[in-house]
Image: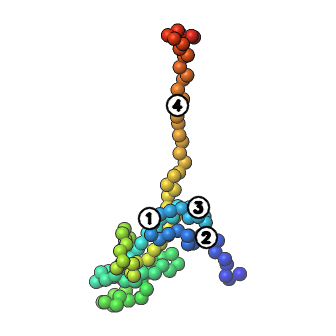
Amino acid sequence: MFFRKKTECTHLKVNPDVEGQYCPDCGKYIENKWYMVRCTCCNVKRKTIIKQGLLQPLTKYCPNCGAQAFYSQEVKNINFIDINFAALKKEIGTNKTGDRNQLWVEREPEPVRLLGLKLN
């Protein structure tokens, strides 16, 4: 009763190295976004974790200045230095294909012409 099984997809099969792809388990379009937490006082990068869906620093206080306040920023291009401080959040994005209508026009058949004669 206390421990319920989660029915939400965790999107484990979505690769973190792509910007986004469809999840093979649930079929939704998943966008990979990297976030980093910084101290508001000294702007030092802090190790980021995701706890209950929220971005938080790993430690309660900044190791550089001791401040508790922080802010998060989205990292567009992750590099090998920032990967130790950033956290990956897999968010459900907008469907890229969507519903589309296509229209094509068929040509009317041309009249048959035999040796310059018109047959109508």
* Distance from Cα at disc 4 to Cα at disc 1: 37 Å
Q: Residues within 10 Å of mark 4 (few under 14, many from 20)?
A: few
| Mark 4 lies on residue | 105
| Mark 1 lies on residue | 19
Question: Disc 4 on helix, strand or loop?
Answer: loop
Q: Amino acid at mark 3?
A: Gly
Which residue lies at the image location 53% right of the left edge and 20% below the top edge? Answer: 110
Residue 12: x and y, percent?
A: 55, 72
Query: Is 45 above or below relative to 33?
Result: below
Which residue lies at the image location 49% right of the left edge and 67% below the top edge? Answer: 91
Q: Considering the image in quadrants, where does the C terminus appear?
A: top right
Residue 64 appears in which quarter of the rendering? Answer: bottom left
Q: Is residue 71 shown to the viewer in this render?
A: no
| Mark 3 lies on residue | 27
The foreground one among 117 and 34 is 117
Q: Considering the image in quadrants, where does the N terminus appear?
A: bottom right
| Mark 2 lies on residue | 8
Residue 52: x and y, percent?
A: 52, 78
Residue 33 appears in which quarter of the rendering? Answer: bottom left
